[in-house]
Image (cartoon, rainbow, N blue to C red):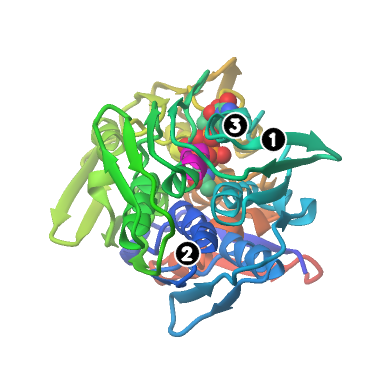
Amino acid sequence: MSERLEIHGGQPLDGTVTISGSKNATLPAMAAALALPGGLLLSGVPDLLDVHTMRQLLTSMGTTITAPHNGQLFLQAPDTLNPNAPWELVSRMRASVCVLGPLLSRFRHARVALPGGCNIGHRPIDLHLRGLAALGADISISEGCVSARCSQLIGTTIDLAGPAGPTVTGTCNILIAATLAKGHTVIRNAAREPEVQDLATLLNAAGARISYAGHGTIEIHGVDSLGSATHTVSPDRIEAGTFAVAALLTNGRLTLQHAPTHALTDFLELLQQVGARLTLLPNALIVQRDGPLRPAHAIAQPYPGIPTDLQAQLMALFACTPGESRITDLVFPERFRHAAELIRLGADIHVVGNQARIRGVSRLSGAPLTATDLRASAALVLAGLAASGTTILHRIHHLDRGYQHFDEKLRAVGGQVRRLSESSG
Ligand code: UD1
């Protein structure tokens, strides 16, 4: 049943939030299990909707998945399976496309529905397909699906640079495919996101020979088969960044346990410019204001730049920051649907092309809102927490796709947030 959040704003958040395992590291890791005949034991798996969807997809193919302990999954893909990723699941979660590489490398055949566009803009998979074709896959598109087949993948040099920089899940797909290709593969302009490095660590634990040559170049020496692996997913840098913004927006003080600060350097630098006082502890980060907020220009770009997945949250922050701030998104230039919802709370935002100009207002005021996509949903919850009065956020399944128990975590640090079913009054 569909649900909504009721948010009473104006309360500073105060306390400790434990950061969960990374969604974007978990999904390709789960898909990689398809290529590991010996099975994969994953720890630090977050409890969120996209993980359940990936579980459903892999199970529908024939993978056995058990949960030995809280936060753990054991995945075992048999020697023969059904290599189809249907539209019903791919349309719910684009990361389903991550099964393409592992299916092709171990089973020599994959059929995956084309993901199409989505709420954050045009999202083609041409670079994934170009890379797999360069490795020798025979690719065809019919009835809305990509079919990829090969007799043997052969190592080669692949450039994954696209018009908006490298592709993250594309790099994951090529990395897994090249692991079992014959010979040596070089990926140039590979995505440098920590989630890709997480995947490389997992694959190496299973017997792959992947090394980083610097400057976005990855070298892979193909092996005949992979074995098994045990892997712990890294903490979620986007969840940590979201709670850091929450602390600043509500003028509170949050201790973020396990925050992966090394993976957020540009973002944390920006927060300091905006007026954050950051205190680094051995395994935690304390975030609070260091005086009044100051305007800034945030440019979302590939790693190690400010993540596009934190752009909407920054827009909520800038909406309450005196002066004029700007946000430019170089990764998804059309990712501004949340601006219209923030304007309903009283924000002063103008979007032109890939840039938003935001003039801070002294106070947002609560209103009914509709969540448009995953990260936008989080931004709207944060804005609601900073606004006066009550904000109702509808369509929160977007939020549940990517945040583990977001409303519970907020309540634990003083956020006045209630989850209600759409049918209740
Ligand atoms: C991943 C993340 C998502 C994040 C995004 C950018 C996962 C599961 N999702 O998505 O949360 O917002 O990275 O950091 O990890 N592009 C092409 N051709 C392609 C593929 C991509 O032109 O074949 C373009 C896209 O339109 C976009 C840019 O490249 O402009 C980056 O997209 P990409 O890195 O592929 O995003 P995802 O991997 O889908």
Q: Is residue 335 visible?
A: no
Mark earlier in primary sequence (1, 3): 3
Residue 416: x and y, percent?
A: 51, 65
- Residue 374 marker: none
Amino acid residing under circle 3: Ala
- Residue 36 marker: 2
Mark 3 lies on residue: 133
Circle 3 packing at 10 Å, graded few (<14), some (14-19), many (20+), is: some
Identified at 48% across, 75% down, the residue is 73
Mark earlier in primary sequence (2, 1): 2
For ligand 1, which image quadrant applies?
top right
Query: Is mark 2 in CB contact (under 8 Å) with mark 1?
Result: no
Residue 140: x and y, percent?
A: 75, 34
Query: Is mark 1 in CB contact (under 8 Å) with mark 3?
Result: yes
Identified at 49% across, 58% down, the residue is 32
Identified at 32% across, 30% down, the residue is 217
Q: Is residue 327 left or right of residue 127?
A: left
Relative to 106, residue 361 above or below: above
- Whether 169 is among the magenta residues is yes
Q: CA distance from mark 2 to mark 1?
A: 23 Å
Mark 1 lies on residue: 139
Secondary structure, magenta segment, majority class: helix
